[in-house]
Amino acid sequence: MKDYLVNLKKTDWYQHLKPVLGLDYLNQINDFLNKAYTGPLRVFPPEDKIFSAMLYTSLANTKVVIVGQDPYHELGQAQGLSFSVPDNFPAPSSLQNIHKEIASDLGKTRNSHDLILWVKQGVLLLNSVFTVEEHKANSYAGMTWEKFTDSVIQLA
């Protein structure tokens, strides 16, 4: 059985979440991920990006939390950061709305669709559900992630 929590375990988030959630629940998440990623359907984000939101900013560095629904569900889009897509993809409508608000509020135009710089500045771009099946938005809602996400938000 693969350890899908390996990247999470590299973060200070894990040390804070482990006593709150318990090892049994964290093992349930790992079991869920093993079934999802070895099943017949394609799942996003890529395995190494599931916990990117927490891998690139520490709990201590987190200043703002922005919560999205779930990862983008088309090939190549999901980065493990809510609303962020690689620059070689067109901005999805939710990201277009964010760009419009930045322009309206700050008078600045943002050309990049990759929001990793925000994360490195302490913006936790968290999806309420960390995984999704290809072409099926919200497909893993209610299956395992909500308790985890609630705990992350409470810690932040």
Image (cartoon, grey):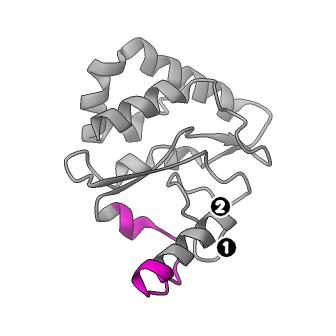
Where does label 2 land, which residue? 77
Q: Categorize mark 1 by other alpha carbons within 10 Å: few (<14), some (14-19), many (20+).
A: few
Where does label 1 land, which residue? 89
Give the percent coordinates (x, y) of residue 64: 32, 54
Segment tinted magenta in the rendering = 103-119
Give the residue drawn at x 40%, y 82%: 106
Give the percent coordinates (x, y) of residue 23: 37, 15
Is the residue 105 above or below the residue 69 in the image? below
Would you say the residues marked 1 and 2 are in contact, meaning their CB atoms lie under 8 Å apart?
yes
Q: Amino acid at mark 1?
A: Phe
Give the residue drawn at x 42%, y 66%: 116
140 within the magenta span: no
Q: Amino acid at mark 2?
A: Gln
Q: Secondary structure at mark 2?
A: loop
- Residue at the far left in the pictured view: 60
Q: Earlier in the sequence, mark 1 or mark 2?
A: 2
Is the residue 4 above or below the residue 120 in the image? above
Is residue 30 shown left or right of residue 97?
Answer: left
- Residue at the far top in the pictured view: 24
